[in-house]
Each structure stands twice: as C-alpha cells, then as structure tokens.
Image (tube, rainbow, N blue to C red):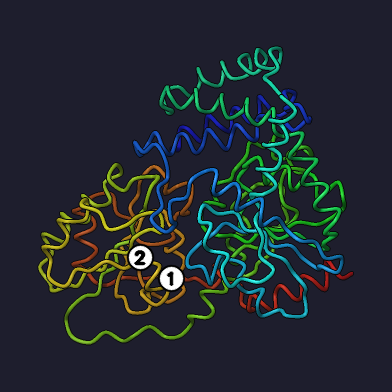
Amino acid sequence: MQEFQKLLLELDNSHSDLHFTFSDSTPVWPILRWQLRFAEMQSQSGSRSVKSHSGQPVSLWNYMFFCLQNRPKFSRNTDMISIANYEGTPGVPNRMTLFLKDIPELKKQEWLYSNNRKMFGGLSETYSFDSFFYTSWLKSKLMFSSPNKLWEKQLDDFLNPVRQMLSAYIRPEAWFQIRSELSFINRVIPVYRKTLKTALKKAKPKFVLVSEGNNGEWKQAVLFQVAKELKIPTGEVQHGVFNLGMKYGEKLALNPTLKSMKTDYEFVFGPFHAGLTNAPVQCIPFGHYDLERAAGSTEPKTGETMRIVLICEGIPPSSIDNGLLKHTYAALKAFQKPFQLTIRLHPSEAPDEKYAPFFEFPGTRYSEYTTETVHSLLKHSDVVISHASTVVFEALYYNVPVVVLQDANTETYIPKGVGIPFHNNQELLDQLSRQDFSTTEGGEFWSKEGVVSNFRQFWKQHIQS
C-alpha cells in the first residue's frame, strides 16, 4: 500500500497538466486515479466485488425503472440538497447527514443513491440520485453514441505507462475493467453533465451537501464542476478515515482543474483531521452527530472478565490477508485471563465461516450494525482490537484503549501515536496481558461544539452571507 501510494504521487506530478480529457473536457487522470486505488485494494484482498448483505437483490431493469419513477421533484425555495449513499436501515438512509433533521428551518431535499429500491418507504423529500445517471445512459443509447476510435487510441497511449508502473499491484483482468469503464464514461459523461446541470438549474439550491464525494468517483466530480459553474457551493461530511488517505502529489493538489472536481468544504471530525489531507478543499472542524448522540461515560468494569471487541474489515480489503484474524485468534488462544469477545462485523459483510474458530471461546458473539450501534458497543468495552478504521478514533472518544494492527494501510489512515500498535500475535498478547493501557489524548480528534450548532454557524457565515 505504501509503495503503491508513492507511485500514485509520482504519477500525480507527471500527469499534473491533466492534458488528456473525456469528451466533455473532464480530465481523465483524477478519475483513473480513484479506479486504480480501488483496483489495488481489491487485488490486495483477492476480492472481485463488494457484496453487501444489507440490500435486497434487485434486477437491473426493475431498479432502472424505479429510479426513473423517483426522479427528483424541484421546488424553487429549496435551501439545500443532500446527496447520500444508502447506509443502515431504511429510516436512517445516511448517518453522516442525519443531523439535518435537527435543523428544521432549512428546506431540503435528499437525493439518495442505493442498490436497495425499497429503502425510500416513509421518507419524505427523498428521491433517486441514480435517476440522473440512468437518464443519461438511456439518452446516450438513443443517440447511438459509439466509441471514438481516435480517443480510444489516445486512451491506450495514456494507460500504457501507468499500467507498466503499477502492474505489480493490480490484477491483469482489472486493467480491462478499468479501460472499459473509462470508455463507457467517455460516451455518457456529456449527457450526464447536461442532465445534472438542468436539474440543478431547476432546483436552485443555496448549498449541495454530499456524504462522500472527495475520493474521485466521476459522477460526483461532474456534480461539483456543474455546481461551481452555477455558483452553488458544495460540501462533504467526513465519513471515515478513508478521507484521510486522499493525499495528492503537490502539482496535482495545486492544480485549479482538480479543485473544480472537489467539494468547496470538507466538514471533518475535529482539528486533528483538518491537517491530514492535501486535497484542495477547505476543512472545517465539525464533529460527529452519531457520536454526540451516544455520548456518556463508559460502563464501569465489573468482575475479572475482559470485554474485548474485534473490529472487522469487510470486503475489500479482506481481513484474512493482512493477518488480523490470524494474529487475534492466536493471541486469544494463549491469553490466560477470562474474556468475552464481540466480533463487530463491517456493514459490507454477514456472519462468515472465517470467524468460526473464535466461537470456541466462551461467550463469543457477533455484533451487526443493523441491531447495535458501534458507539453503544464501545461504551461497554474494555479494549478494542482494530485495523485502520474510524473506530480507532471513536473508541478514543470514550477513552477506551485500541490496539491497532500495523499493516500496509495503517500509515496511510492512522497516524503514528494514535492507538497502541501491534505487528503480530505475540505483541498483541503482550498488550492484552499487560492491561496497563494508556489511551491517546483525543481532545483534537473531535470538535468541541456540537454538529448542529457548527453547521448553523457555517450556514450563517458562508451561505447566508
């Protein structure tokens, strides 16, 4: 991961002129960069796709029809549009923007993109963001848009040196998928841009807030460009440590074209996080609404049994490959004191046979996000075993010590000094046996003011004025 990141930074500086573009003049490199990062994660884990157990399987045509049926309705007095990935239960489609319900004075719409067509039930002013994409795709089909042979040749010339440099980190078949996706984007992107521009002109929002869009996915990049053309400010709520990994080469980070593809504002958890990315955005310490709602003292320990929480990684990357499960199992097998283990599953996964060995330990149980919040779990814990996860910072909020696996992702997402490091099962066993944990001071990890008051202040200073 570290070596791959270094090569990306090298490519950032060599591609910083952004000379090669899609047919609507959007630079290819920032979009390709995101695809490369994702492909490297999948190659590292051995997984080919992200499989979530949270949504119901839906046929493509049924879902397309549903999206087109649920196209946004526009109101001229809309203050804000919130665009969110579907997370959690149907009643809470996106936990990172849930704070908006506590700001009733702002009139807002939510544009949701999701693979679950049933999650709209009971949600007012919620529409399908995917409808813009599918509308564009269908229009491009009707216009018989076909690959531009000259552009396809230029694409190969553009990809070849990148492929040579990164071939050791990405599976051969992934390159075909990347090229096919770029070719598809080139055909659809002009219509998508026009469709989105028409929609924003009708809606006339004062502000567009996204749950995640700073990573380089092309649909969001075009959204930000169109919004800026229409002088509509955009913002993003930090949804995890993945934001912290968006470190660009200096030439690319300073390029005004890249800035046009990013949000204007990033609402980060606290001052500490504001300095951990060099993406061309303005970072504002903001807090974490879910964390604030769950605030309170941790449950005092009773008895000798240690309450241990294992944070799972989901897919990708797979926790099998970096040794998290292997090291944790070996350490707990040798641990001489009584403990109760809770396996906290990632939202992208369900109970799996790879966790079966842990159930030989008495009292072991699963914890899933659909039935138990991670914050409730942390408050009732004595120690957390984790990887490079947002949970590291969330546990420190409750003064719960976190033992963090040092793997290829750690340096990118978890700065030194945060959590207690371990490299193997012996080091983990030593930490668990010692039990004299010293947690990292977390005063700068989180905003001292509440999310709602912070957003109201932001609105008054940056939007109303």
Of residues 396 and 191, the one nearer the viewer is 191
Picture layout, residue 4 above or below residue 394? above
Secondary structure state at the residue bearing disc 1: helix
Which tag, 2 or 1, sits closer to the chain's start? Answer: 1
Instruction: Tell me which corner region of the image, top left, top right, bottom left or bottom right, holds residue 126.
Output: bottom right
Residue at image mark 2: 402
What mark, if any, has residue 9 been given in the picture?
Answer: none
377 left or right of 459?
A: left
Secondary structure state at the residue bearing disc 2: strand
Determine the residue positioned at 73% across, 47% down. 223
The crowd level at tag 2 (other Cα within 10 Å; few <14, some 14-19, many 20+) is many
What mark, if any, has residue 396 been given in the picture?
Answer: 1
Determine the residue positioned at 83% across, 70% down. 461
Q: Amino acid at mark 2?
A: Val
- Compute the Cα span from label 2 to label 1: 7 Å
| Image quadrant where one finds the N terminus | top left
Q: How many marks?
A: 2
